[in-house]
Image (cartoon, rainbow, N blue to C red):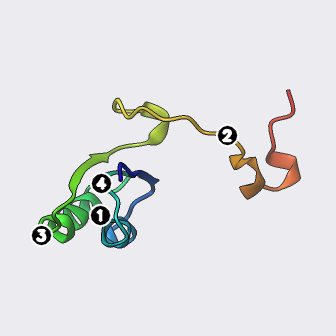
């Protein structure tokens, strides 16, 4: 199957590695920490799944195609966008 995973805030890559073990065909991760990206790169290096990792803020998207919807539920009512 063609299952692609994008994890925003991928940290050390453990969730991405788990997704690879569950059949993901392609992994994408982004994290603010360069140290975490290096750790994730090392962790995923023995994985047989294609992976792409980026260091930076999602607000400054490095070219990852994505569509996001319904994520407002993670924030309190005062922080929700209403217009």
* Relative depth, front residue between 6 and 24: 24
- Name the element at disc 4: loop
Horizontal side of 58 relative to 52 (left or right) equals: right
Q: Specify few, some or many for label 2: CA neighbours under 10 Å numbering under 14, 14-19, or 20 or more.
A: few
Q: Are marks 4 and 3 in contact (CB under 8 Å)?
A: no
Residue 42 x/y as whole percent: 15, 67
Name which residue lies at 25% across and 65% down: 40
- Mark 4 vs mark 1: give the one in front: 4
Residue 60, quarter of the rendered image? top left
Q: Provide the residue designation for mark 1.
A: 36
Does label 1 or label 3 sit earlier along the sequence? 1
- In the rendered image, which residue does mark 2 sit on? 69
Alpha carbons under labels 2 and 3: distance apart:
33 Å
Foreground disc of the pair 4, 3: 4
Q: Nearer the viewer, residue 38 or 6?
A: 6
State the SS at label 3.
loop
Give whichever of discs 4 and 3 has the lower sequence position.
Answer: 4
In the picture, measured across the screen, residue 67 lies left or right of residue 50, that is right
Mark toward the start of the polypeptide (2 vs 1): 1
Dot in front, 2 or 1: 2
- Density class for disc 3 (Cα within 10 Å; few <14, some 14-19, many ≥20) is few
Numbered disc 1: secondary structure = helix
Q: Earlier in the sequence, mark 2 or mark 3?
A: 3
Residue for badge 3: 46
Q: CA distance from mark 4 to mark 1?
A: 22 Å
CA–CA distance between discs 4 and 2? 23 Å
* In the rendered image, the vertical position of residue 65 relative to residue 18, given as above or below: above
Picture disc at residue 49: none
The residue depicted at 39 percent of the width and 60 percent of the height is 10
Which label belongs to residue 25?
A: 4
Residue depth check, mark 4 versus mark 2: number of the one nearer the observer: 4
Label 1 close to label 3 by CB (< 8 Å): no
């Amino acid at each position: 199957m063609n299952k692609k995973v994008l994890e925003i805030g991928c940290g050390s890559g453990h969730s991405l590695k788990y997704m690879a073990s569950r059949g993901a065909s392609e992994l994408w991760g982004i994290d603010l920490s360069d140290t975490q990206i290096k750790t994730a790169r090392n962790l995923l290096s023995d994985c047989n799944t294609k992976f792409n990792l980026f260091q930076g803020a999602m607000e400054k998207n490095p070219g990852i195609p994505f569509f996001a919807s319904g994520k407002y539920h993670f924030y309190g009512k005062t922080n929700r966008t209403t217009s």
